[in-house]
Amino acid sequence: MPAFATDPWGAAAAALVPRFGAAAVELRYYPRREVAAVRVTAQPHPVLARHAEPPDPPAPWTATAACGSAVGWVLAEGPPDDPDAVDAVLVRAVERHTALRLQQRTGQARALGADLLESLTHRLLTDVVTLESVADGALTGAYDGEETEDIRHGLRQLREAALERLAGTRDVMNSLRPDAPLRPEPLVAALTEEFAIRDVAPRLHVPPGEVPTVLVPGVGWATCARLLADALATDERLGGADATVSVAAHPDGWCVRAGPAGAAPAPNDESPPWTETMVGDLLYAGDLAAMAGGAAGAYALSDDGLLVELLVPAAAST
Amino acid sequence: MKRVLVVDDHPVVALAVKAACRADGRFEVTATAATARDALGLLEGLDAVVLDLNLPDLQGPDLVRAFRARAPHVPLVLHSADDETPQVQAVRPLVDAVAPKSRSGDLLRALRRLTGAA
């Protein structure tokens, strides 16, 4: 997911791991204290089983550093040779990652917000002009009986599409409200429920032993899952009967990838802007994920396929 | 009767243009298309194309150039919701006329001029 991939932890891990000898070490981080501790890297293997643990996860040896509301943890199977040196590296890594993350998220939110507004206003302008053109034809008596019925049907569709667009935009903007509801939601259960409702059955891959839980303010992950199920049911670019949905651990939460079976972005493939033109009604799912602190990416495949990725902030697994 | 292709992803707009052409009596909308891909396969034997600038699969100058490349001699009327946008201004030199979607009279006048329909 190059659009929001960062590896601020690589240097920290390189400096820390040798200090623990052969003991396993992992780094965890979360931008808000008291929510979760998400694994960003582990060497040579994880210390704890789950990707997203409750804050202050237990381990034989731990260290913690904070930057504003963000917290980072070092967990290890045993003590390091120099705890002060480990603390220093952790503090710098948490500060650096928090600053970079803030820059990245701010830039992404601005771009998505601007595109959302442009998309909405352009479509509303088009709708107004469409109504004007219909009125123009009606006033000049251009329509015969069959055309009148077709236009009536078309106007109903226009109304429904406009209402959906307004509702989607409102959902995204309301998710930014400080008092927006925020509750952990089971990622996979929401997907399977929506897939059943839409009667779609993509192959679903989830890391063994994990029950991913996510945090999306406002209308929540359930709405993202509904939009993804709708897209899988209607957008053949996502693979139709051969579609695959995979859930993978990511340093910033959980990455949900949907597309034709076996599809993957080319190495170093830059994700183009997440726009309605690119992803259709999935626009709002990506915007909700991004406004929540995650991200969204889409890749046009060489055979007219489409691969989409939603990075969703994690809550502690239950 | 002059043969016209209407390319617009909004079916109501295509219907309105079709009705306006029928009522005018000099034009027949022989086909409508909602995507560039579909439209580019329908360019044989046309007298004019009425084209929306923002199609789901192609937009802006790339869209206009695709039509020009496939049918360089077929008059192209850009059918625009707002002809003052930078996007429309950018493609204005590439098309034969720009007509606002809100006024069918302007579109019909452009079609008459470009096709020589009496």
Image (cartoon, coloured by chain):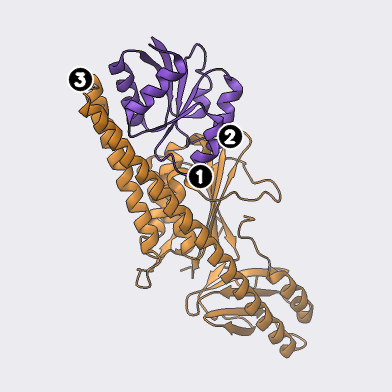
Chain colours: A orange, B purple
Q: Where on the picture, by quarter, is residue A57?
A: bottom right
Where is residue B36 drawn, in percent x and y? 51, 28
Secondary structure of the residue carrying tag 3 is helix
Note whether A29 is above or below A140 in the view shown: below
Looking at the image, which is closer to me, A51 or A282?
Answer: A282
Mark 2 in CB contact with mark 3 (< 8 angstroms): no
Where is residue A33 drawn, in percent x and y? 50, 80
Q: Which mark is residue A145?
A: 3
Note whether A131 is above or below A180 in the view shown: above
Query: Is residue A187 visible in this depiction of the protein?
Result: no
The chain ID associated with circle 1 is B
Question: Residue type at mark 1?
Answer: Pro
- At x 34% / y 25%, what residue is drawn? B17
Q: Is residue B109 left or right of residue A146?
A: right
Q: Is residue A275 left or right of residue A75?
A: left
Q: Which mark is residue B86?
A: 1
Looking at the image, which is closer to me, A291 or A135?
Answer: A135
**Label 2 sits on residue:** B62
Question: Residue type at mark 2?
Answer: Asp
Label 3 crowd bin: few (<14), some (14–19), many (20+), radius 10 Å? few
